[in-house]
Amino acid sequence: MTENLNPQERPHTWAKVDRYLEQRLIPEDAALTQALETNEAAGLPAYDVSPLQGKLLQLLVRMNGARRVLEIGTLGGYSTIWMARALPEGGRLVTLELEPLHAEVARGNLRGAGIEDGLVEIRVGEAREQLEALIAESAEPFDFIFIDADKPNNPAYLQAALKLSNPGTVIVGDNIVRGGEVIDETSEDERVQGVRRFFDLLENEPRIEATALQTVGGKGYDGFVIGIVR
Ligand code: SAH
Ligand code: DHB
Ligand code: MG
């Protein structure tokens, strides 16, 4: 076992520890496993959150007693399923996705997971436009918002999320470490610059109190921002 703790094999160890923790904490779930297989078969990128991260989202939704959840970036609906299962009777989850194929795969996965019709609404199109539409239609505020789409738009997503929030709304952002690249101010990766602008906003935004968690595991080295709206 000790050879696996060799620093040069860390990513390997992270993945093994993820599997250990999953075995202890996450019961086998055929629908979630099937969703990942369906995503892969449909050629979707494997950007889904990990099982342990999905469960973290689910617990955060429950801990906040959220009834209305907004997700920006559906992919195949893997994180959507985790969060939707945390909702009480009469709850609602709106998830935004640019790619019609991703949305179609997600619909199938949600059905496969037995998520009741009407609980989840997938809105297809540019998330920025979808968010403007939600704001324009005075959508009831959301209690929990998960930002996980294209990273260059993160600052715009945070600003829209604040407009769709109430005091106490929890906002979570994924992929905010990017293997450590987030600290490279000269990075030419637009995703890294998007995340850095997201932090600039958070630094100067009095309406949200936030922290960040670096994460390692089967998905490598990354992290979450977790904040609460004042
Ligand atoms: N939350 C998912 C992963 C999302 S991956 C999970 O954990 O299971 C990011 C998704 O954002 C992709 O499906 C991508 O198509 C979508 N996306 C990228 N740019 C977008 C945009 N401008 N508007 C809406 N969705 C976008
Ligand atoms: C990317 C997006 C994600 O949501 C993710 O979890 C990993 C990577 C990306 O766009 O590179
Ligand atoms: Mg992500």
Image (tube, rainbow, N blue to C red):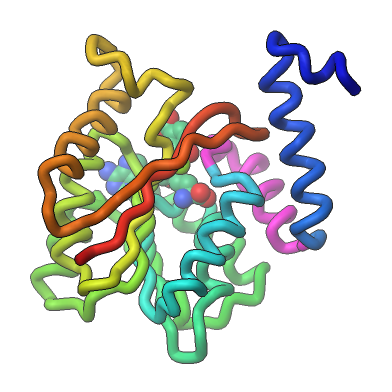
Q: Give the residue drawn at x 40%, y 81%.
A: 67
Q: Is residue 189 left or right of residue 212?
A: left
How many numbered discs sit on the rendered protein?
Answer: 0
User: Relative to 162, is 102 on the left or the right?
Assistant: right
Q: Position of residue 118 (x, y in %)?
A: 45, 82
Q: Residue at x 13, y 77 (%)?
A: 138
**Residue 37 drawn in magenta:** yes
Nearer to the camera, 86 or 184: 184
Give the quarter of the figure containing the C terminus.
bottom left
- The answer to whether residue 3 is left or right of residue 173 is right
Question: Percent position (x, y) of residue 197?
Answer: 19, 32
Q: Quadrant of residue 108?
A: bottom right
**Residue under the image location 12 percent in, 49 percent down:** 205
Task: Please state which of residues 29 and 67 is positioned toward the viewer in this rendering.
Answer: 67
Residue 143, relative to residue 161: is it above or below? below
* Observer-nearest of 186 and 103: 186
Q: Quadrant of residue 116?
A: bottom right
Asked whether residue 27 appears in the rendered view, the answer is yes
Whether residue 107 can be seen here: no
Residue span colored magenta: 29-47
Q: Residue furthest bottom?
A: 89
Identify the residue at image location x=24%, y=31%.
194
Looking at the image, is 211 positioned above or below residue 45?
Answer: below
Residue at the farthest right position: 1
In the image, residue 193 lies in the stretch drawn in magenta: no
Measured as percent of width and height from the top left, residue 122 is found at 39, 65
Against 189, is 48 above or below? Answer: below
Quadrant field for ligand 1:
top left
